[in-house]
Amino acid sequence: MKRFVAEDSFWELFPEAEIGVVVAQGMKPASQVSEASAKELRRRLIQANEAADQHLTSNTISENEVVAVWREAYKAFKTKKGARSSVENLLKRVLKGNPVGSITPLVDMYNIISLKHALPVGGEDIDAMEGDIHLRITEGGDAFRALGDEEDSPTLEGELCYLDDAGAICRCWNWRDGQRTALTDDSEKAFLIIESVDPKRSCDLRTALDEMAEMVSEELGAQIFAKGIITRDDPEMVIDA
């Protein structure tokens, strides 16, 4: 049995945070996704890029409320220089007129949700994880190699990370995913997360979570093993039997 646990060191910094989790199992490989489904996802991605505009009221990325809350959150823990929330990176592309394009069906899905709702969304391959996942402040030195990098970049002391027994799986909260547990075209089990630090957006988070679960089920034929919201009062969830 594998669990996801958000530890006390996280809640001490962000007592009102909420983390939506969808665990999808039995996903089709990308090669088996029908052209109709792939076309539908590309259409939704175009719409999501357009919908992201509603969250961008300023041409200065940091002045937009959905970004500003994450800029403030990232001041609460140690980060690698230049690290920003994943949602800021997506919205910045929209602001610059460089819309997010199609990558793979599963990645397209969480980019659709992230753009549409202006919330950070990520995913990991459960079968590639070792032991439970913990979200906590780290003592530093946890093994990590970011997607696309050729060298290791261990965690910093005081950094907030998702970790398993073998090291970090996502650094600086939701900034960069690692290669070891990254979702691939052949992943069968996905741990999908949507994060919020703004209590006013609790309803938005729940809507986004429902949409994610529905999309993964409909387009990838996945079974939803678990779906829920992690809070300070309910800080853990079973993610694999």
Image: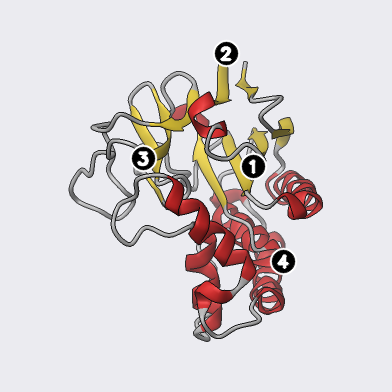
Q: Earlier in the sequence, mark 1 or mark 4?
A: 1
Marks 1 and 4, how far apart at CA: 32 Å
Q: Secondary structure at mark 3?
A: loop
Which residue is the site of mark 1?
17
Q: Secondary structure at mark 2?
A: loop
In which quadrant of the rendered image does the N terminus lie? top right
User: Does residue 139 appear left or right of residue 44 in this picture?
Assistant: left
Which residue is the site of mark 3?
159
Q: Earlier in the sequence, mark 2 or mark 3?
A: 2
Q: Secondary structure at mark 1?
A: loop
Viewer-proximal residue, 32 or 145?
145
How far from the left and from the top, in percent, is residue 135?
A: 49, 32
Disc sitting over residue 40 in the figure: 4
Q: Earlier in the sequence, mark 3 or mark 1?
A: 1
Disc sitting over residue 1 in the figure: 2
Q: Residue at x 48, y 57 (%)?
A: 85
Scheme by which the image is coloured:
secondary structure
Residue 50 image-quadrant placement = bottom right
